[in-house]
Each structure stands twice: as C-alpha cells, then as structure tokens.
C-alpha cells in the first residue's frame, strides 16, 4: 500500500504562522474536546507540532497516555492527535514485525491504543519501541528463505494509551499524560463534524514547521537542572519548539517539564515507585510490620498509583509483589508476629537499605528545586538567536516578557523586563 493510500496530504497554510498563537489555538482545541490534567493541553499542543518537526529531533519521546481505570479519555486523546499529527497511523493491537516494517516503510506517527492488553508481556515489542527513542534506532531481523540480516528503521513519533503504567524502560523514554475520569460538570464538545477546525490547524502546523525546521533543530533551550539526562532528552525537542514559537510558550513548557519532575524523574522506575508507596504505607500505619494482605490493600488505596490495575486491569498480587521486591534483595513474605498471632508479611527493617538507596531525598526548597543555571546577559544573548534571520537575539528587544516575582536568580537583568523575568532571561 502506497503512502498516498494511507495518509492524507496536508497543504501548508497560505500565510506565515505565528508559533505562539498556533500553540495557543492547539491548547484551546485540546481543552475544548477533552478533560485534561494540569499542563495536559501544553503537552498535547507541543507534541502534535513535534510529530511534524520530528526530523529536527535528536530523541523521540513517546507520549504515554495512561489512566487508572476505563473511561478516562485515553482513546479521545488519540482521536484528537490523529486529526493533527503528521502521517497518523492508529492501531489497537500490533505485532513486532508489523511495527518495525511499517515504520521502516512509511515513517508514520504511530498511535497505539489499549496497550495494556498486549504490551506488558511482549519483550520483542518493547525492544522495538525502546530502540526508536534515538534517531539511529534500528532493529536487525533475518528475512527471506536464506535468512539474510536486514536492518529496519524504528525512528518515528509514537503515542501509547493504556490502563496502568508503561513498563519501566518505555516509561523512562516518555512524556506522561495521566488522564482521569471527568466529572459530570466537566462538559466537553464532541469532535464529530469539526473537520474544518482540524484541517486549518493541521495546515498551520505544517506551515509553521516548514518555515522553522532549522531554528527548531538548532535551538538550545535551558533545561531545568532537576531533570535527569533521559528526561532532558525527552523534553529537549518540546522546549525547542516552544522557544522558537515565542510568546509565553517557553515559560509554559518549562512549567510543564518541572511539574513532571517528581513523577518522571525523581520517582524513577516502577520498582522505585513501589518502594516509595510501601514506605508511605508503613509511615501512615505507624507500624514496623504489616501482614501481606494488609500491605497490598493499602497499596490499592493510594490515589493514582497503578497497583489496583497492575495485572492487565486486575490488582497486583502477593506473588507479583514478592517478585519485584526480590530485585532489591528483600526476603519476601516472611512469617511475622503481629499481636498474638503469626502471619505472612513484611517488617519495616527489611526495607531500610532499599529505601536509602533508591528513594530520592525529600524535595528541597522551592527556590532550590526550580533553580536554573545562572547566566549573564551576554551568555543569554549568545544562547538565543533570532529565528527569522539567525542573527544574535538581543534580550532587550524582547517584547513577550511574562512577569514573575523572584528577581534573585539573575546576576544581571534584562533591561526590557527590568528583572521581572522573560523567556530570554531564563525565568
């Protein structure tokens, strides 16, 4: 099947597009049709543009659309994206060979729904998705009757929707959008009959990216220091798009990245999340030992935690808990005494070493947690370039300043905003 048969062509908008205004229109469209978590509209606006600017990226962050239960809007998010992203290709189930052959042949934007039904036990599929995080991502497979090794490209934008959380290695390569079920008063519009709305937005995205692909590729945004290396890779291209778009979008993108530091970065992988939640259970119960069934029931009660739907929509079992704890050298499910009875359970002292090694320290003060590298005015001037003619950008000419209250983070202040803060002051 040819590309013409699979993908509708997008005619770029007839006039130059203001990037900041485009992102605002995308954000408003997202909140018009979906109930989203905080910063969800920002992430969707940036990621939809990213799918068209994928060639400018060094890393391709997965968009992980997750929820604790059904009917939280995951499929609606993918439907909205399918109307805006570059070369959308939707699938509710896909095999490894179908995935890498499709990517190699068409370089689409893959939109995978209901991944909880097939992804968790598919090592081959996870490996393919992991490899596509880097632009040199490929897999090698033997093909033909003579088993000739052949290299297949796995580099393309991918969004995955599922109940529960992605497996650790995929989660680490993702921008996370954690959906929740909407309340009765949270009304949204239906997308049916809105073809003109989405066609115009798609054309504007295509025009903006066509005019700004090189500035996006060459952008050097300031990355929040609290992001680890992998998270910095994930957010770099989205921050670059926001920086080039202008207006207040760079600041909005930084806020979105910072808001996910605890869950994406400091929270580590799923095993570390499990340890953190177990520590919370022991602290809340104010005890040094817990029966296994009680520990698991308390894990289920932690809001937004994945344990109640961990096993393909079913709760985490005692055996699965024991298997994960073995990774940390914790002797599992011992016989303990609680009051006058004996039962299977865990003691707090079993976890102390793992808590110290794997659970990040409590966040420091707000000013420390959000502190960026301090730049002089000359350094800021050299860092950012005018996206229209590649001349050095002068922060004093910037007229999109957004006011903030903290003037203490800069050694020198921008004359335009007088230290109140703007995107080019790294505030």
Image (cartoon, rainbow, N blue to C red):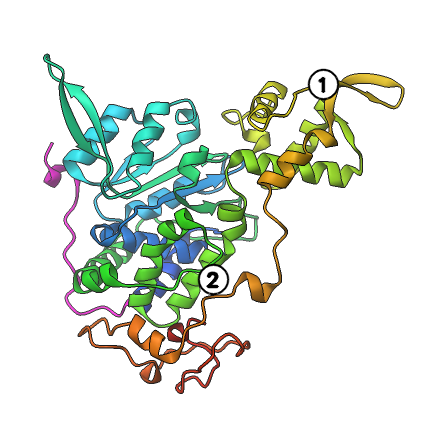
Task: Say which residue appears at 17% left-offset and 42% top-offset.
Answer: 7
Classify residue 138 as left or right of residue 162: left
Residue 334: image tag: 1
Query: What secondary structure is the magenta-colored segment mainly?
Result: loop
Task: Say which residue appears at 28% left-offset and 53% top-offset.
Answer: 50
Residue 255 sits above or below residue 122 on the image? below
Task: Say which residue appears at 52% left-offset and 63% top-offset.
Answer: 370
Residue 402 position, x and y percent, is 44, 76
Q: Is residue 16 magenta?
A: yes
Helix, strand or loop at mark 1: strand
Residue 166 versus residue 192: which sits nearer the camera? 166
CA gap between label 1 and label 2 equals 45 Å
Residue 200 position, x and y percent, is 23, 59
Question: Would you name the residue on which mark 2 appears?
Answer: 255
Question: Magenta span covers which residues?
Answer: 1-19
**Quadrant including the N terminus:** top left
Classify residue 67 as left or right of residue 290: left
Classify residue 280 as left or right of residue 100: right
Residue lying at the far top of the rendered structure: 145
Residue 324: image tag: none
Check disc 2: other Cα within 10 Å, few if <14, some if 14-19, many if 20+: some
Helix, strand or loop at mark 2: helix
Residue 393 sits above or below residue 33 on the image? below
Task: Say which residue appears at 28% left-offset and 42% top-offset.
Answer: 134
- Is residue 303 in sight in this rendering? yes
Residue 417 sits above or below residue 212 on the image? below
Check disc 1: other Cα within 10 Å, few if <14, some if 14-19, many if 20+: few
Classify residue 163 as left or right of residue 377: right
């Amino acid at each position: 099947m040819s590309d013409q048969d699979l993908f509708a062509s997008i005619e770029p908008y007839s006039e130059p597009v203001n990037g900041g205004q485009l992102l605002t229109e995308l954000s408003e469209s997202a909140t018009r049709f979906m109930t989203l978590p905080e910063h969800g509209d920002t992430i969707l606006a940036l990621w939809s543009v990213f799918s068209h600017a994928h060639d400018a990226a060094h890393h391709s962050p997965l968009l992980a659309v997750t929820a604790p239960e059904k009917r939280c809007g995951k499929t609606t998010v993918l439907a909205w994206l399918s109307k805006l992203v570059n070369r959308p290709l939707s699938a509710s189930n896909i095999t490894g060979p179908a995935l890498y052959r499709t990517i190699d042949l068409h370089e689409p934007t893959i939109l995978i729904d209901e991944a909880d039904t097939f992804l968790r036990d598919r090592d081959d599929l996870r490996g393919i998705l992991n490899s596509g995080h880097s632009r040199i991502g490929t897999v090698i497979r033997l093909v033909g009757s003579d088993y000739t090794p052949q290299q297949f490209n796995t580099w393309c934008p991918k969004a995955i929707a599922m109940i529960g959380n992605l497996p650790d290695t995929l989660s680490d390569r993702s921008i996370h959008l954690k959906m929740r079920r909407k309340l009765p008063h949270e009304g949204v519009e239906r997308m049916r009959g809105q073809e003109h709305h989405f066609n115009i937005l798609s054309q504007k995205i295509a025009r903006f990216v066509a005019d700004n692909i090189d500035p996006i590729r060459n952008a050097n945004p300031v990355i929040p220091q609290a992001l680890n290396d992998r998270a910095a890779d994930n957010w770099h291209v989205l921050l670059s798009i926001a920086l080039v778009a202008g207006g207040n979008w760079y600041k909005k993108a930084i806020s979105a990245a910072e808001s996910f530091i605890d869950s994406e970065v400091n929270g580590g992988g799923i095993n570390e999340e499990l340890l953190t939640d177990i520590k919370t259970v022991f602290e809340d119960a104010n005890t040094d030992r817990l029966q296994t069934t009680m520990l698991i029931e308390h894990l289920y009660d932690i809001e937004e935690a994945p344990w109640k739907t961990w096993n393909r929509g079913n709760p985490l079992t005692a055996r699965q808990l024991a298997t994960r704890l073995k990774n940390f050298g914790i002797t599992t499910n011992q016989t303990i005494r609680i009051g006058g009875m004996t039962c299977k359970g865990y003691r707090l002292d079993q976890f102390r070493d793992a808590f110290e090694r794997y659970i990040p320290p409590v966040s420091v003060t707000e000013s420390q947690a959000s502190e960026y590298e301090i730049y002089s005015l000359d350094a800021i001037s050299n860092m950012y370039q005018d996206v229209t003619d590649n001349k050095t950008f002068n922060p004093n000419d910037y007229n999109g300043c957004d006011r903030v209250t903290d003037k203490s983070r800069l050694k020198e202040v921008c004359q335009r905003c007088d230290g109140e803060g703007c995107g080019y002051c790294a505030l």
